[in-house]
Amino acid sequence: MAEIRFHKLAAVAVFVAAAAWVYTGEFVSVGSATNEAGEEAAKPDEPAARAEEAIRTVAYVVPPHMAHARAIRISGQTLSDKRANLSVRANGVIEALPVKQGDWIEQDDLILSLEAEGKAAMVETARQLLAQREAELAATEALVKRGTLPTLRADEARSAIAAARSQLEAAQADLDRIQVVAPFAGYVDRVNVEKGSSVMQGAQVATLISIDPILATGEISEHDLRYVKIGDTADVHLVDGSVRQGKLRYISREATSQTRTFPLEIAVPNPDGRIPAGMTAEITLFGQPVDAVTLPRSVVTLSGSGDLGIRIVRADDTVGFIPIDLIDDTPHGLVLGGVPIGSRIIVAGQDLVVEDEKVNPVEADAEAIRQLVGEATGSVN
């Protein structure tokens, strides 16, 4: 029994000692005093270290400025300068058809003639009648001068001449209606009838086109309209790879309601007729030269508000943002306007910094610039 009591007393003593240790909390300091001291020692240097890590290094360039003409590219097609659908003005049977599709003809050349059916004889009869009336007037006027006939007879003779002349003109017009002639020089693009066939008045018999000059037509946006004017030079790129130059000769003063764009025409010399109508074409118009710089496409970024532009390093080494005007897209990069002279433009790290952030600017070396240009052209070597 004495032994059992001893164990109970020992257990109670251990329990009381453990409770006293827990209550005092001294165990917390085990292994922690050194850590706290270490942390306290590190705290004075932590802000400086974080500030040093926050300053990013960016590469910049100061690009040269140049005068560049804005290139405005428009999709379009070629059209004939003139086009006429020729029709007959009388009923009849086709007697002569001296042209065929593809022929070149001059203005007033005969394209088609109907059978005269006595119309030529009517013209000749009217011409003879007019000659007779003129002779009668001469004889009547001679007799009036002698006093043999009254003046009224001379007036009647003049009226008869006027009637005969009208009859001749009507007969001649009726004869002219049997012929179809070319209103201008050009190519016979289509012939719809055959010799010997019968046609009705108003029937379309042929199509005549003029393709010198050939027209390149398209529509320019309302934003680009202010940069062009009548007489400007334009390049016309054709699907066969050739490039022809022409002059802007027409701009519509009314926009197309669906697209809010303005139709225009470029007149391109085509003396050999090698450019046909209806061919796909890309028109490039050039505006007045403006001050610009050329930069890789990767340099362009977005501001916090979503505006397109570039980031620069200000004089105090903070980041700034400049909205840009996209003037042209060339194989060497984007041509941008609105960039102040001497601007330090960030070309590496621009997407990792924000406006007003302090940075460590470093001028980009030749190799970095070469790689950027290669990236812009898609031909890094």
Image: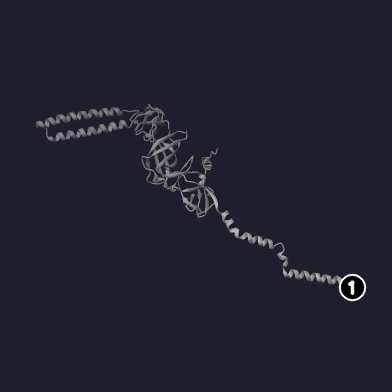
x and y percentages locating residue 81 in the rendered image: 38, 36
Q: Quadrant of residue 67?
A: top left
What kind of element bears circle 1?
Answer: helix
> Is residue 267 or residue 255 the one in the foreground?
267
> Is residue 351 or residue 81 the one in the foreground?
351
x and y percentages locating residue 342 in the rendered image: 45, 47
Residue at screen point 21% across, 28% down: 131
Q: Is residue 126 visible?
A: yes
In the rendered image, the quadrant that contains the N terminus is bottom right
Residue at screen point 72% across, 70% down: 24
**Horizontal placement of 152 versus 91: left or right?**
left
**Horizontal placement of 17 versus 291: left or right?**
right
**Horizontal placement of 14 versus 311: left or right?**
right
Residue at screen point 25% across, 33% down: 167
Q: Which residue is mark 1?
A: 2
What amino acid is at disc 1?
Answer: Ala
Residue 79, compared with residue 35, is above or below; it is: above
In the rendered image, the quadrant that contains the C terminus is top right
Q: Quadrant of residue 197?
A: top left
> Is residue 70 or residue 72 the one in the foreground?
70
The image's colour scheme reads one colour
Residue 289, compared with residue 49, is above or below; it is: above
x and y percentages locating residue 250 in the rendered image: 37, 41
Residue 249, compared with residue 1, is above or below; it is: above
Label total for image? 1
Farthest right residue? 1
**Horizontal placement of 294 versus 28: left or right?**
left
Q: Is residue 148 visible?
A: no
x and y percentages locating residue 248 in the rendered image: 38, 39
Quick one: label 1, few (<14), some, or many (20+) residues within 10 Å? few
